[in-house]
Structure formats: C-alpha cells, structure tokens
Image (cartoon, rainbow, N blue to C red):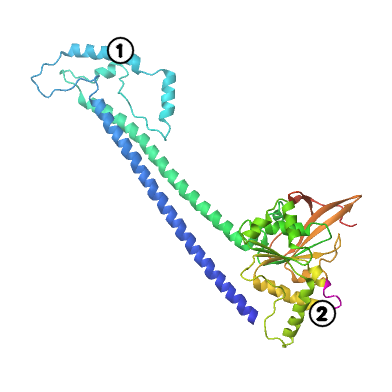
Amino acid sequence: MGLLNEAERRRAEMLQKLSKEKKKYIDTVSTARKKLIIDGIKDQRKIFEKVKVKLVKKSKVLVSNKLVPTIKENNNVKRPKIEEQKNKVVEEVGTKNKKLLPTRSQSKHLLSKASSPSKIRLPSKIILRSKVEKNKLLKSNDQIDMSSIKAEIEKELHSEKGGSKVVLEGVESSVESLAEQAIKTKEVKLQEEKSDKAYLKTGVPGFDNLYENGIPRGNVVIVAGGAGSGKTIFCLQTIYNNAIKGKKCFYMSFEESEERLVGHMKSFGWDASRMISSGKLKVKRYSPFEVTRSVEALLAKEKGELLIDVQPIIIPKDFKPDIIVLDSLTAIASAFTGKDDSYRIYIEQLFHFFEKLGATAFLITETKQIPEIFSTTGVEEFLADGVIVFYNIKRGNIRENAIEVLKMRGEKHQKKIVAMQISDNGITVYPEQEVFGGTGE
C-alpha cells in the first residue's frame, strides 16, 4: 500500500507540474502573438503614411505641370487663341515625348520593377501618348478640360494605391508567417526541454540513434562486457558530455584511482579538471571492503537490531547527482566471497537506493568477451531497467568491437548488434552497420 500511495502522490505532482507548464506555455505564446500583431499594424501604418505623403506631393506636381497651362480665375486676363494653344501643346508634347517615352526594353524593366510588392514606384509625369489624347484636354470654347486632367490624375493615383495595397497585404502575410514561426519555435523548444527532462542522451556519436528518444531518466542500467571492450570509456564519455551540459555527475570507482581516471579522460581530449572545478563532476575511489561493513549494518537493520538509516553507498554531502557510474559491481562482489546471501541483500538495497535517489545509474560488470550472463550472479540484470552489452569479437587474428542494447524499460530501441570503434576521440557507434556471422569465439 505504501508503494501505491507513493506512486499516486508522484502522479498527482506530475499532473500538477504539467498543468503549470501548459498554462505558462499558453501565456507565452499569447503574449508573443499579440506583440507580433501590434508591431505589424505599426509597420502597416508607417508604410501607408509614406505612400500617402508621396501621393499628395505628386498630385501637386501633376496639377502644376508645365504641360498643362494654369487656369486663371480672372476672366479679364487675355487668353491665347485656341489654334495657337493647340499648336504650342503639340510641339511641346512632340519634343518632350522623345525624352520621356521609354523604349520597349526600358518599359519591360520598369514593369518588372513596378510588379514587385516590396517597392512602390510613383509616377514622375503624366505622359500623353498621342496628339489625340492631348487634344482631348481642350474644349472648343478655349477652356482647358480640368475634369479630364482630374480623371487622369485619379487613374494614376488609383493604380499606385493598388500597389500600396499589395504591399500592405504582403506585410500582413509576413506578420502572420512570423507569428506562426515564433509559435513553432516555442513548441520545438518546449518539446526539446520536455525530452531533455524525460530522457538522457549519452552524447556518444551514433549510440543515441539506437533509441527512439533516449535512456529514460532514473533508470538503472547494467553496462556489461569483457576486459578492454570499452565499458569504462563509454561511461566516462557519457558523464563528461552531460557535465558540460550542466548535469551533475558522480563516478564511483572501486578499482582505479581518481588521478588515473582523470588522466584517461584527458587522453581523449576531455577537460575533466575544468568540470571538476566547476562542481559538475566528482570522481571518488572507494574500497570494496568498506561496503562489507555497510552490509553488516544493513543486515542488522533488517533484523531490527539497528534503528538508524544506513545507505548502501555514500554520496558526498551537498551533492545530488543526476548521473552515477559505479565501477564496478564485480569488484564489490569480490568482497562478498562465500557470502552470497549478504551480496544479494546488498544488491537489492542498492537498487532501492538508486530508485529513491532518482538518478540515472550505470553499473559496470565484468563478463566474458562474449557473455552469456551479464552480471556476477545473473540477478542484477533482472533487477536493472536496462542492459547495454559490449562485445570484443575475435575474427581470425583480430578483434572487432560491437555494442548492443539488450534491454531498456520504458523505451523503444533497435534490437541488433552494431559495429563500434574506439579512437583517440572516444567511442563511435555505427547504428546502420550490423555485425553478422555470430559473436562466438
């Protein structure tokens, strides 16, 4: 009942947290969308005002154009005769049309520029195309037809307003596309953050491609393989890649010293010292025989003889790791020689401890080069959430490295043995390169 209550409590907390994140996301998207729309409206107003000012200026120029004589309201002013007026206008149009009328190639160029919605091309002059069009501006009573001029101006202005409308429509569509892009970017970012919280990426080239999402956070994973198969390098590479992302990582060694492990990391170009100084990485060596004393206390606690809480491993104070590497279970098992029952109790307590801590744990175990069981007693692999197997396959006189995700609770993964290489930069996995022909010695 205690476990069920705890699971229900965690589920309620998770639902509450997801509800808060959803509300925060909706508020953020709504604010971003409002800002983009307001900015778009401001830009539209600016463009409209510019177009309006230019059109007003141009209309003044058109009315005062020298091609059309100014009307005098004073009727006493002597006007030129109609024939002289016609001849003068025709001569002016004939001489100016040579300069003003564009060639065919120039017309195509001007039309292509005018068709672009990003530029507004205002007319410089009203060009009369022929003598007939020019003569239409004059009436038989020696008065200039201002209604025709007005209609011509309105026609030109109408065509320019049409262009400005296209521009404004283009601005509106741009604002909408920017809003959609901002929303999509936010959704992708939230999805990545959600994925980062739920799954662990090792950062080992090619290895993460064996999973649909990654290793579920909080899983306890057995890393099994023979000597020299790449288990330690894989774990060191994983904690370094996550330490540089800000995750707290703890490497517990029951075999090699801290200096030697840090030296291994430096040989691959990983600046472990900087990560240790930043407080994101801790490497500590323990003695397997210290564990046996803890087990005696654990056994006493199980019998009710000890009232204090005893932990199977010691985590440094004020340091809550996101990732733990225990190197190795084989070394710990050596301290329990002839005490199989004690070792099983310890392993059970160890897995409960990792589950309570919530950290993702990698437990290294030494096996044969081509293992048939993947832990010291065979029990560990059943208690673990995942099993990653490293192979050191002998083919003739050479050995080839390979890797397999044998098991991973809560995550889909590829079920095949694939090639792997250890170089000066660490491990590289080739997920598309399967290893065929068996793995037997």
Image x and y of residue 4, in percent: 63, 79
Image x and y of residue 276, in percent: 65, 60
| Mark 2 Cα-neighbour bin, 10 Å: few <14, some 14–19, many ≥20 | few
| Mark 1 Cα-neighbour bin, 10 Å: few <14, some 14–19, many ≥20 | few
Q: Label 1 vs label 2: CA separation?
A: 114 Å
Q: Which residue is more in the foreground, 164 or 279? A: 279
Res 341 label: 2
Res 136 label: none
Kind of residue indicated by mark 1: Thr
Magenta range = 334-339
Is residue 319 rendered to the left or right of residue 78? right
From the image, which quarter does the N terminus lie in?
Answer: bottom right
Q: Earlier in the sequence, mark 1 or mark 2?
A: 1
From the image, which quarter does the C terminus lie in?
Answer: bottom right
Main SS of the magenta part reads loop
Residue 195 appears in which quarter of the rendering? Answer: bottom right
Looking at this view, name the residue that lies furthest to the front: 259
Residue occupied by mark 1:
95
- Secondary structure of the residue carrying tag 2 is helix
Kind of residue indicated by mark 2: Asp
Q: Mark 1 vs mark 2: give the one in front.
A: 2
Residue at x 30%, y 30% (from the top left corner): 155
- Secondary structure of the residue carrying tag 1 is helix
Image x and y of residue 149, in percent: 24, 25
Looking at this view, name the residue that lies furthest to the right: 396
Q: Eyeballing the image, is 292 above or below 136?
A: below
Residue at x 42%, y 50% (from the top left corner): 36
Residue at x 30%, y 31% (from the top left corner): 157
Is residue 74 rendered to the left or right of residue 434? left
Q: Eyeballing the image, is 216 above or below 70?
A: below
